[in-house]
Amino acid sequence: MTFGEKVRSLRKEKKMSQQELASMVGVSYRTIRSWEVEGRFPKQNVLYQKLADALQCDVSYLMSEDEAFITEASEQFGNRGARQAQQILEQAAAMFAGGSLTDEDKIAFMDEIQSLYLDSKRRAKKFTPKKYLKNQEEK
């Protein structure tokens, strides 16, 4: 079940409209709709917690490992980081399309890829020229 399907199912179970849920979480109706229909997901971990509270469920139920990785990349490195994380997941999934790895091996591989990506982004920040870092702090 996808994130959007989980949200829709829980919302309907609680007999809430998208607008009511949006008000409880502090987002727009369009945001809830994009999560349920368009396959999007929150860009901040705080929204997952608010959503879990509103739907009276555990955060871990809503957030898959892939979504957690993309959300972490988004929080630390912005939209570009989120796009890159999404591409990494898609390319890794394509590698497994006809493969014979066990599920356990696939999970270990994905965990390591995600860890390597986040570590490399953090290290790259250290070598960013100061003039660019100063501009980012002002924004």
Image (tube, rainbow, N blue to C red):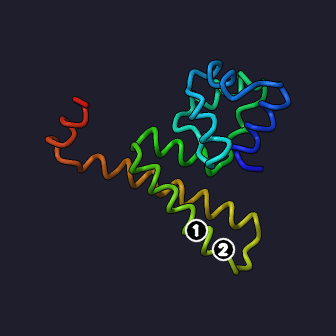
Q: Residue at x 63, y 34 (%)?
A: 32
Secondary structure under badge 1? Answer: helix
Q: Quadrant of residue 29?
A: top right
Position of 42 with respect to 96 (left or right) is left
Residue 53 or residue 38, whichever sits in front? 38
Q: Vertical placement of 10 versus 22: above or below?
A: below
Q: Vertical placement of 106 versus 139: above or below?
A: below
Position of 115 with respect to 53 (left or right) is left
Q: Residue at x 76, y 41 (%)?
A: 6
- Furthest toward the right, the residue is 13
Position of 112 with respect to 96 (left or right) is left
In the rendered image, residue 130, in percent from the top left (x then y), is placed at 16, 41
The residue at which mark 2 appears reads as: 96
- Furthest toward the top, the residue is 24
Position of 36 with respect to 138 (left or right) is right
Q: Quadrant of residue 95?
A: bottom right
The residue at which mark 1 appears reads as: 92
Residue 96 or residue 107, whichever sits in front? 96
The numbered mark at residue 131 is none
Q: Vertical placement of 91 versus 18: above or below?
A: below
- Contact (CB < 8 A) between labels 1 and 2? yes
In the rendered image, residue 15, in percent from the top left (x then y), is placed at 83, 25
Quarter containing the C terminus: top left
In the rendered image, residue 97, in percent from the top left (x then y), is placed at 67, 76
Type of amino acid under label 1: Ala
Type of amino acid under label 2: Phe
Q: Residue at x 63, y 25 (%)?
A: 22
In the rendered image, residue 56, in percent from the top left (x then y), is placed at 78, 24
